[in-house]
Amino acid sequence: MKSRESFLPKAVAAVCDRRDLKVGRDFRRSQTAATKIQVVELPIRTRDGIFLARYSEKGLTEINFPANPNGRADLRVSLDAPQRIPTKIRAWHRATAAALKKTLAGDEPKVFPPLDLVGTEFQQSVWHALRKISLGKTKSYGEIAAVIGRPQAVRAVGGACGANPIPVLVPCHRVLAANKKLGGFSGGLDWKRSLLKREGIKL
């Protein structure tokens, strides 16, 4: 069985600490004693710009919104070098790209890649609840808190939604504040309005 250090070619993978996975930050070698994990980053080109997907050896671990709709991504890896990307990650990436494009078009994806969602037990419970919100439907932060059995944790639910590392596919944009107000969104409120509108949701 291969170790994590040998999971990917050095030209493809970047070794990073989970805490180093921040939007727009280059991967770097952490100097801490924390567990390191191999991550592959790949672009997804859409009509809305270039999204960035990141994969661990377990599945999709993060999606980042485009820095700007028409900008060029400064990416070290692309699908133009298939021999450098493990077969399973290429398959996961195809599923991710298809699911993302379907959701952006206001459709419900049928196939998802395996998700490697890393968070606290509370965050995991919130993200699990988010995945049960159907296309074209919304719930409030309070309703999600009730669903997970923590009715007083409304603010914490909002925090977990904001920490969701795989927006769009784990649809935190379908969670609203009280009285159908937008609330927050990690990708920005313009993105949240747009995603809801594409799903036929009127506020």
Image (tube, grey):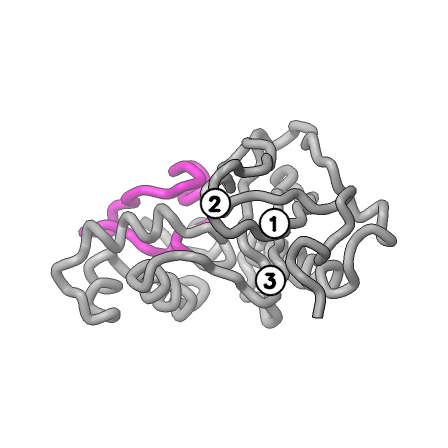
In this view, the residue in front, 164 or 21, is 21
Q: How far apart in space, not on screen, are marks 2 and 3 (Cα)?
A: 24 Å
Point out the tag, 1 or 2, that comes first from the N-terminus. Answer: 2
Q: Where residue 54 is drawn, which disc sits there?
A: 1
Q: Residue at x 70, y 46 (%)?
A: 13
Give the quarter of the image for residue 25.
top right
Q: Position of residue 84 (x, y in %)?
A: 83, 51
**Mark 2 Cα-neighbour bin, 10 Å: few <14, some 14–19, many ≥20:** few
Q: How far apart in space, not on screen, are marks 1 and 2 (Cα)?
A: 22 Å
In this view, the residue in front, 97 or 4, is 4
Point out the tag, 3 or 1, that comes first from the N-terminus. Answer: 1
Q: Residue at x 42, y 62 (%)?
A: 136
Give the quarter of the image for residue 87.
bottom right
Secondary structure beneath dot 2 equals: loop
Mark 2 highlights which residue? 33
- 47 shown above or below 131: above
Q: Which residues are magenta?
A: 171-195
Point out the tag, 2 or 3, that comes first from the N-terminus. Answer: 2
User: Which quadrant is home to the N terminus?
Assistant: bottom right
Give the quarter of the image for residue 133.
bottom left
Mark 3 highlights which residue? 59
Q: Are marks 2 and 3 in contact (CB under 8 Å)?
A: no
* Magenta span includes 187: yes
Is 168 on the left-hand or right-hand side of 83? left
Q: Are marks 1 and 2 in contact (CB under 8 Å)?
A: no
Label 1 sits on what residue type?
Arg
